[in-house]
Image (tube, grey):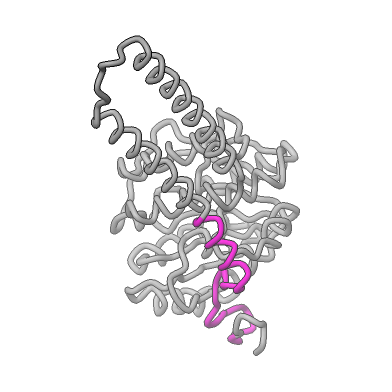
Amino acid sequence: MLVSVVIPVYNGAKSIGPLVDRLIDELTGTDLQVVLVNDGSPDNSHEVCSDIFHKHPEKVRYVNLARNFGEHNAVMAGLTHCDGDYAVIMDDDFQNPPEEVMRLVQEAERGGFDVVYSYYQEKRHHWLRNLGSDLNGWMANFMLDKPRDLYLSSFKCLNRFLIDEITKYQGPSPYIDGLILRCTDKIGKALVRHEERQEGRSGYTARKLIRLSLSMFVNFSVMPLRVSFLLGVAVSLAGAIMAVLVVVEKLLQPDLSAGWASLALLILLFSGLQLCILGLMGEYIGRTLLNANRQPQFVVRSVLQRDDKKRDEHGAT
């Protein structure tokens, strides 16, 4: 059984070498493949990952992306280039201990699960990352029919069936958990340790968290359009009721002067609602345009693998 460990690398020059060494030490006796994906890191991660490959050519495959595409795109690149019967996705910051990798694989094998998510007694992410995770989890409950007791951890194990299914997706804005949830309901969980980040800081900024939420919001569900329709109906009904009340009040008190404040409030309310719905429709249309223009999900500059050859994204040597 070949186990692939897919690691997206972004500004991980200081941590990725020790992480790979520890993975190889901890998984001695396991048929192991480590797939490193450099997601356009501005530091010297490329040189470090190249050195790691030359140090462990029998265990490591190195995929160098042409620019920064984002974590989920980098993971898709890693899954596309991995060969394992199981693939474990983990970050490059040591928050997921390497010795926990086989716990996920064994749980997937024992339970016949397509995917096994990790969960923690205590999360040690930055509060902004936790906030984003909680928000994404709540939206996934609503829009993707995620089991409510499931934590969508980035540290997870996928079997070959699921890897092959989700890598069929060619859209420019993948959301890994959305792809998983639409493909399978054979989902397991495993309790693992979560440790403090050893180097640097999280690459997730508020902007990236918002972009990730939008990817789930409009790429994998039409629920926002249905909500906007229901909201429009509700506001229209409220407007009709208010109109009836105004007419009745005028009939009962003919000398009553109409207030400009209520009129301004109604204009602002309806204008804001219309702009929100138009913006939502524009987001769907814009993403449709990107798909029609075949914006790439990722672009591979080079691949280093066991035969020590470089390949471009088309597989040419």
Between 115 and 27, the one lying in front of the other is 115
Quadrant including the C terminus? bottom right
**Residue situated furthest top in the rendering:** 252
Farthest residue to the bottom: give it.
317
- Residue 310 picture location, percent across and down: 58, 86
Residue 84 sits in quarter = bottom right
* Magenta region: 282-310
Looking at the image, residue 106 sits to the left or right of residue 227; the answer is right
Residue 86 in picture, x, y percent from top left = 67, 54
- Determine the residue positioned at 43% across, 55% down: 211
Question: Which corner quadrant of the image does residue 270 belong to?
Answer: top left
Q: Is residue 317 magenta?
A: no
User: Residue at horizontal 44%, vertical 45%?
Assistant: 274
Quadrant containing the N terminus in the rendered view: bottom right
Relative vertical location of residue 22 with respect to residue 256 in this rendering, above or below: below
- 39, 3: nearer the viewer: 39
The correct choice, above or below, for 182 with respect to 27 in the image is above
Q: Please name the residue shown 65% across and 65% down the image.
A: 170
Give the tally of numbered discs: 0
- Residue 44: x and y in percent read 34, 76
Q: Residue at the spot x=36%, y=45% of the render? A: 129
Q: Is residue 294 magenta?
A: yes
